[in-house]
């Protein structure tokens, strides 16, 4: 595969991971309260002492919240960082031209379906965590990344659209303050204290439809249960 083709594929894959996150539609799928078996050995059972930071009083609750979401979206943030790194290296030796842009658009279209339904299936809250973790792994906000590889006008457009879907593409990452608990989760992933699979699978249109269908069935069953309890 030549350098130009490599860049085209990397850019296409990169945009699917980042830009489609703003279309993470609000979901109300029933969330489980179960936490994996290694949770008991995680950071929440360890006494943590910080000289300049108070551990949140609801640390345990926040940890569970971020654990569920990070397990799903952290692999995407890692992949985004890998693609950006590869793209930067490839761009060093290639000059952009009209033919390359045409081929890039074609590659973008062919890879779009690989990630579209996976990211659409994210909760809005998962999309928010993803934008933070992308900053953690790349040192750039999603808006900054878009501006770097596309025009400023396009970056403004994407940021504007994101606000309609409760997404902040300018989100950064502050591990010592507001993102402290999320950082504890990531550190537990890295240390092996909590089971974590960095791999992810894409979701096809058929799989997405199936998931939505199963969700509707679960929602209907839950309504019946609630109604039955009220009638007792």
Image (tube, rainbow, N blue to C red):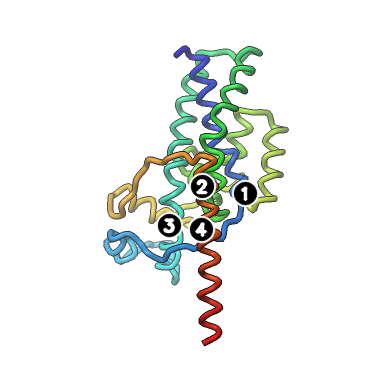
Residue plotted at (61% across, 34% down): 146
Residue plotted at (30% across, 66% down): 45
- Between label 4 and label 2, give the one nearer the viewer: 2
Q: Is residue 41 left or right of residue 216?
A: left
Quarter of the N terminus within the rendering: top left
Residue plotted at (53% across, 76% down): 226
Instruction: Give the image location of residue 175, x and y in percent.
Output: 46, 53
Circle nearer the N terminus (3, 4)? 3
Real-space CA distance between mark 4 and mark 2, rounded to the nearest whole angstrom: 15 Å
Instruction: Give the image location of residue 194, x and y in percent.
Output: 31, 54
What residue is disc 1 on?
168
Secondary element at tag 4: loop
- Between label 2 and label 3, give the one nearer the viewer: 3
**Residues tagged 3 and 4 counted as in contact (Cβ below 8 A):** no
Q: How many marks?
A: 4
User: Badge 4, how many Cα within 10 Å: few under 14, some, many 20+?
Assistant: few
Could you say which quadrant of the image residue 94 lies in? top right
Instruction: Give the image location of residue 124, x and y in percent.
Output: 57, 54
Real-space CA distance between mark 2 and mark 3, rounded to the nearest whole angstrom: 12 Å
Secondary element at tag 1: loop
What residue is disc 2 on?
130
Real-space CA distance between mark 3 and mark 4, rounded to the nearest whole angstrom: 18 Å
What residue is disc 4 on?
178
The disc label shown at residue 68, or none: 3
Instruction: Give the image location of residue 134, x and y in percent.
Output: 50, 42
Question: Which residue occupies the foreground of this view, 163 or 91?
Answer: 163
Secondary element at tag 3: helix
Q: Is residue 190 left or right of residue 20?
A: left
């Amino acid at each position: 595969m030549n350098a130009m083709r490599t860049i085209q594929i990397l850019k296409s894959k990169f945009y699917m991971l980042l830009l489609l996150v703003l279309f993470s539609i609000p979901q109300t799928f029933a969330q489980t309260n179960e936490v994996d078996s290694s949770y008991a050995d995680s950071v929440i059972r360890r006494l943590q002492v910080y000289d300049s930071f108070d551990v949140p009083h609801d640390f345990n609750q926040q940890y569970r919240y971020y654990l569920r979401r990070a397990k799903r979206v952290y692999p995407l943030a890692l992949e985004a960082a890998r693609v950006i790194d590869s793209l930067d290296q490839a761009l060093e030796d290639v000059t952009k031209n009209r033919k390359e842009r045409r081929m890039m658009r074609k590659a973008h279209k062919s890879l779009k379906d690989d990630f579209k339904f996976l990211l659409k299936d994210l909760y809005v809250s998962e999309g928010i965590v993803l934008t933070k973790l992308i900053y953690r792994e790349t040192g750039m906000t999603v808006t900054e990344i878009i501006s770097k590889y596309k025009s400023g006008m396009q970056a403004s457009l994407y940021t504007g659209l994101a606000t309609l879907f409760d997404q902040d593409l300018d989100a950064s990452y502050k591990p010592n303050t507001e993102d402290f608990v999320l950082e504890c989760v990531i550190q537990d992933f890295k240390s092996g204290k909590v089971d974590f699979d960095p791999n992810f699978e894409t979701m096809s249109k058929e799989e997405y439809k199936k998931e939505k269908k199963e969700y509707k069935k679960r929602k209907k069953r839950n309504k019946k249960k609630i109604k039955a309890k009220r009638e007792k």
